[in-house]
Amino acid sequence: MPRQKIEYKSQQLSFRSGEKAPVSAIWRMEHANCVRVPDLWVRIHEPFPACPACGACSNFTLVEEVAHISEDSDFQ
């Protein structure tokens, strides 16, 4: 699985609000109108949210893959 993490980071994929997250991760919201929006954790297959500050659609880029505990085989 480490290969997948490197692949996502190297591709610098960008996603829009409403699209589903390809991996559970910390995502950086890129939204010019709201400069103080914190990074968000989004679970795999969940849609990226609109900007929590103003409700507009936003772009998201991967910061760091962080799996939910339910995705860890050691805890199943």
Image (tube, grey):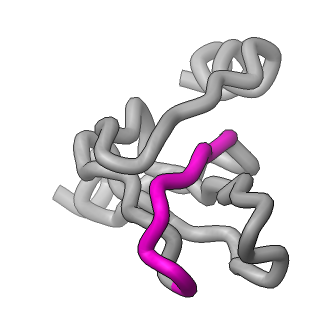
State which quadrant residue 5 falls in. Answer: top right
Examine the structure image and report whether residue 56 is included in the region drawn in magenta: yes
The boundaries of the magenta stretch are: 53-61
Examine the structure image and report whether residue 20 is included in the region drawn in magenta: no
- Left or right: 72, with 41 as reference point: left
Give the residue drawn at x 35%, y 55%. 43
* Magenta span: chief secondary structure: loop
At which x and y percent is residue 4?
58, 18
- Left or right: 4, with 72 as reference point: right
Visible in this render: residue 67? Answer: yes
Give the residue drawn at x 38%, y 40%. 21
Q: Is residue 11 above or below residue 50?
A: above
Q: Is residue 64 above or below residue 14?
A: below
**Could you say which is closer to the camera, residue 24 or residue 14?**
14
At which x and y percent is residue 22?
40, 31
Visible in this render: residue 72? Answer: no
Q: Is residue 45 above or below residue 33?
A: above
State which quadrant residue 69 falls in. Answer: bottom left
Q: Quadrant of the C terminus?
A: bottom left
At which x and y percent is residue 34?
73, 76
**Could you say which is closer to the camera, residue 54 or residue 43?**
54
Give the residue drawn at x 47%, y 39%. 16
